[in-house]
Image: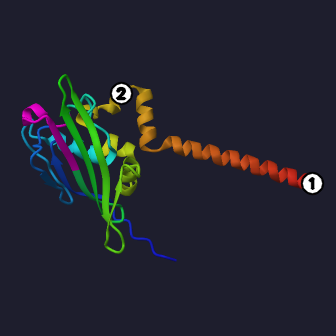
Amino acid sequence: MEARPPIQGCSVDKLLIKGIRSFSPDNKTAIEFYKPLTLIVGQNGAGKTTIIECLKQATTGDLPPNVRSGQLFIHDPKVAGETEVKAQIKLRFRTVIGKPVIAIRSFSLVQKPSKLEYKTLDAALASKNEAGQNVAISSRCGDIDKEIPALMGVSKAVLDNVIFVHQDDSNWPLQDGATLKKKFDDIFSATRYTRALEAIRKLKSEQVQAIKEHRLKL
């Protein structure tokens, strides 16, 4: 029997940001994360929240709140003196078995005559196989938004509401009971657990009935 790699726990190693909010579209800004703790400090407007937003976007594909469908998430073309800004988030993390993986997400924001047009260009996962060869999965042939949480060993709900929760959404524990219940159900996968129990009970009932019918035939 082939031995499974030991579970080490996921970790985030390095983040590259280009053209997101106040981060320049001309240069990539690198942020390294150290163990066991990395503190992010800075003045208001320095980009602390943007780092969390980029971590969440890279891992879940979700835009932060109040960005007008992405238009306010990308560096303003007028500020850059361009008609188009191309932005990118690149995250290097280690999976639950310690395998390094790079998540890449690319965007563009074009200044049209009467509006700004936001586009998601592509998303990809890059890593090395057992032979040491580079392999990549594009969003054109795979669901990156589902693949990354699976590699990290946590659900999307945990990434959204616990690990990379946005400061504008951080008061969700104080929301109404129905919303709070749904959040906790998502975080703890309670709905899936309940459905699994129902399926087991149904299967048990069917098997008991089948046994009774076989006994009558005997």
Residue 106 at least partly seen: yes
Which residue: 9% across, 46% down?
26
Q: Quadrant of residue 161?
A: top left
Q: Tell whether position 84 is magenta.
A: yes
> Going from the N terminus, do you reach mark 2 or mark 1 first?
2
Side of 124 relative to 81 (left or right): right
Label placed on residue 217: 1
- Looking at the image, which residue is at 35% across and 69% down? 129
Residue 85 in which image quadrant: top left
- Residue 14 versus residue 188: which sits nearer the camera? 14
Instruction: Please report the bounds of the magenta region as a residue range.
Output: 73-89
41 part of magenta stretch: no
Quick check: 128 left or right of 88?
A: right
Across and down, in percent, residue 17 comes to 17, 48
* Label 1 crowd bin: few (<14), some (14–19), many (20+), radius 10 Å: few
Q: Residue furthest front?
A: 113
Vertical order, 105 against 112 (above or below) = below
Residue type at the position of mark 1:
Lys
Q: Position of residue 216 (x, y in %)?
A: 91, 52
Q: Is residue 28 above or below residue 184?
A: below
